[in-house]
């Protein structure tokens, strides 16, 4: 017996994350993925799509809205939060850690759903990693800018070359057991206060 | 020992915040890490997977999870109540004007307000207008049941004559202003925020519907409580002392400032201060009105987990068809609230603890809820 492809609804206000998961699902052979960003008319969309699986990110306060829709609406099949079957707490743990919630219509075969749940968890984790890297890169850039400014201040105040000014900052950082960016911040703050 | 507790930014997370910030947890040798959450569903899931040891939780949520209604069945318990009251029903200024023309008045009995709303709804029905829409915060919440109780007792069928939708508290005021909803039932400070923003008028505190009505609890997994009895008892003692501290008027200013921080409730301190003083501004521009027992953090056995409260929630789940009645459910629902753990933890303190596990509660329409009526049906 061939099974119909699962219909998947993805509710995520983060465009990048939604497309990462959507792409992953399509590549894995799930063509019926719908992405919803707008919370207005959500019930209508759910009724129209009649999804087997709904994903929603955990940062979204509208999770409570979604859960009520399952409670009250006779138009939608009632999915169950997170669990593939009623003993599967490991799945929920992985999903919550990755920051995604899943609602799955009861009665689907466990193996069928497990694969896409794992996919969602891994794609959310991939996104989190990307996000962390981006944040780190941003921070590094900020710190580099700060060090440049501190270097400029030291060069001007002490009449030093760029290399010597940098050396002085580094030495101060080592002596005080602080990060170079922290010393640079102190220099910039002090210069502003003494201006 | 560090305990991680989840909470939702609402007035009644006060005892948790005070326990963490004013030395009550430290006094018991525990450290509390409070984590702000964005939805009740997250609170439930993160308690279930063990991210949170315990949490600020909707009372009915512990019962729903224990019975497996609307979600997987995981036994949760409520060994401590986080105060009484603190909710109100607010409507748009437009609906308030219509209700006022139909007989409602600021500060009138909640029965009078309900009759006025019923007339407005009947008139809308005759004019073939769309039903009014009311917001609340979660299907298994006191807000949902209190709102429905008031509507039904006022001759309004909550399932047919109005639409009830869930809207997260931070979005309620905007939804009211935008006309997406005509009113809502929510915990403070969101009613006061709506009045302050000139978007709504408070019809009544829900304590007018049910005096000394319960609200949030400290919820945790039964299994966690069994594995960590000493930590749980220490937490209950810390929360008990923190609740007493929250109730003292001389601490209200400090507490309001503490709660107003963005990492906690993040609402203006002057609004929170009024809530703590049980004073509400009912309409934009009106002076504050004192409302007896509007929010009670500690006194009147406010922290005691009455088994009859859990049973009332279950009776409402059945009444509003969230679940079919079953005698087995009655026992399981009642066992969710744990006065035994409360008593054992607080026995070393000079606490005034009720001897009974249940009490009879009376509502504004004169009806009383007697838990024994329900338990009589149980095996």
Image (cartoon, coloured by chain):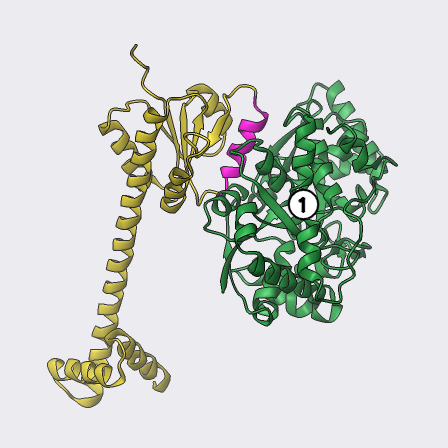
Give how far across and how far down residue A53 sits, in percent: 40, 27
**A117 relative to B184 in the view: left or right:** left
Q: Which residue lies furthest to the right in this view?
A: B366
Q: Mark 1 points at which residue?
A: B337
Q: Chain A is drawn in which colour?
A: yellow
For the record, the magenta segment spans A61-73
Rendering quarter of residue B185: top right
Does the rendering let one see residue B242? yes
Residue A107 coordinates in the image, percent (x, y): 44, 21
How far across and how far down the image is residue B59, in percent? Answer: 65, 44
Q: Is residue B194 visible from the viewing direction of this image?
A: no
Which one is nearer the viewer's eye here, B28 or A106? B28
Residue drawn 38% across and 38% down? A91
For image coordinates 65% across by 51% down, the residue present is B79
Q: Residue B285 lies in what quarter of the image?
A: bottom right
Q: Nearer the viewer, residue A44 or B287?
A: A44
Compared to B299, does A110 lie above or below?
above
């Amino acid at each position: 017996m061939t099974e119909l492809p699962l219909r998947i609804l993805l509710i995520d206000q983060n465009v990048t994350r939604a497309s990462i998961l959507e792409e992953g699902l399509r590549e894995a052979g799930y063509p019926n993925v719908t992405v919803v960003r707008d919370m207005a008319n959500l019930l209508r969309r759910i009724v129209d799509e009649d999804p087997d699986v709904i994903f929603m990110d955990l940062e979204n306060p509208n999770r409570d809205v979604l859960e009520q829709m399952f409670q009250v609406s006779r138009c939608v099949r009632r999915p169950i939060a997170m669990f593939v079957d009623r003993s599967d707490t490991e799945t929920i743990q992985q999903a919550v850690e990755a920051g995604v919630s899943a609602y799955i219509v009861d009665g689907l075969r466990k193996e069928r759903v497990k694969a896409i749940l794992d996919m969602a968890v891994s794609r959310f984790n991939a996104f989190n990693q990307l996000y962390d890297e981006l944040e780190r890169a941003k921070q590094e850039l900020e710190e580099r800018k700060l060090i440049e400014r501190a270097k400029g201040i030291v060069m001007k105040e002490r009449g030093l070359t760029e290399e010597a000014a940098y050396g002085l900052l580094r030495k101060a950082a080592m002596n005080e057991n602080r990060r170079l960016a922290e010393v640079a911040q102190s220099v910039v703050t002090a210069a502003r206060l003494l201006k | 020992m560090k305990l991680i507790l989840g909470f939702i930014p609402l007035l009644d997370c006060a005892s948790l915040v005070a326990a963490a910030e004013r030395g009550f947890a430290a006094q018991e040798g525990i450290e509390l890490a409070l984590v702000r959450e964005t939805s009740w569903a997250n609170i439930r899931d993160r308690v279930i997977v063990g991210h949170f040891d315990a949490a600020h939780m909707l009372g009915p949520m512990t019962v729903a999870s224990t019975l497996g209604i609307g979600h997987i069945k995981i036994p949760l318990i409520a060994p401590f109540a986080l105060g009484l009251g603190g909710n109100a029903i607010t409507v748009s200024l437009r609906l308030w004007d219509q209700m006022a023309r139909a007989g409602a008045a600021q500060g009138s009995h909640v029965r009078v307000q309900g009759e006025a709303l019923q007339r407005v709804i009947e008139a809308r029905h005759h004019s073939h207008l769309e039903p009014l829409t009311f917001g609340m915060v979660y299907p298994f919440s006191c807000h949902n049941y209190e709102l429905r109780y008031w509507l039904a007792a006022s001759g309004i069928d909550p399932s047919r004559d109005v639409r009830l939708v869930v809207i997260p508290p931070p979005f309620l005021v905007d939804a009211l202003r935008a006309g997406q909803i005509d009113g809502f039932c929510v915990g403070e400070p969101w009613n006061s925020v709506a009045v302050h923003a000139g978007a709504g008028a408070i019809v009544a505190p829900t304590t007018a519907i049910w005096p000394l009505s319960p609200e949030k609890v400290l919820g945790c997994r039964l299994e966690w409580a069994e594995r960590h009895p000493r930590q749980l008892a220490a937490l209950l003692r810390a929360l008990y002392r923190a609740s007493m501290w929250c109730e003292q008027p001389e601490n209200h200013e400090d507490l309001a400032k503490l709660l107003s921080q963005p990492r906690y409730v993040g609402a203006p301190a002057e609004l929170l201060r009024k809530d703590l003083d049980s004073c509400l501004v009912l309409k934009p521009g009106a002076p504050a009105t004192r409302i007896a027992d509007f929010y009670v953090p500690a006194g009147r056995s406010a922290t005691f987990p009455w088994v009859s409260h859990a049973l009332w929630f279950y009776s409402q789940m059945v009444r509003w068809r969230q679940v079919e009645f079953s005698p087995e459910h009655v026992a399981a629902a009642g066992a969710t609230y744990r006065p035994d753990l409360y008593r054992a933890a607080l026995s070393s303190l000079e606490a005034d603890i009720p001897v009974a596990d249940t009490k009879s509660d009376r509502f504004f329409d004169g009806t009383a809820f007697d838990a024994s009526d329900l338990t009589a049906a149980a095996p």
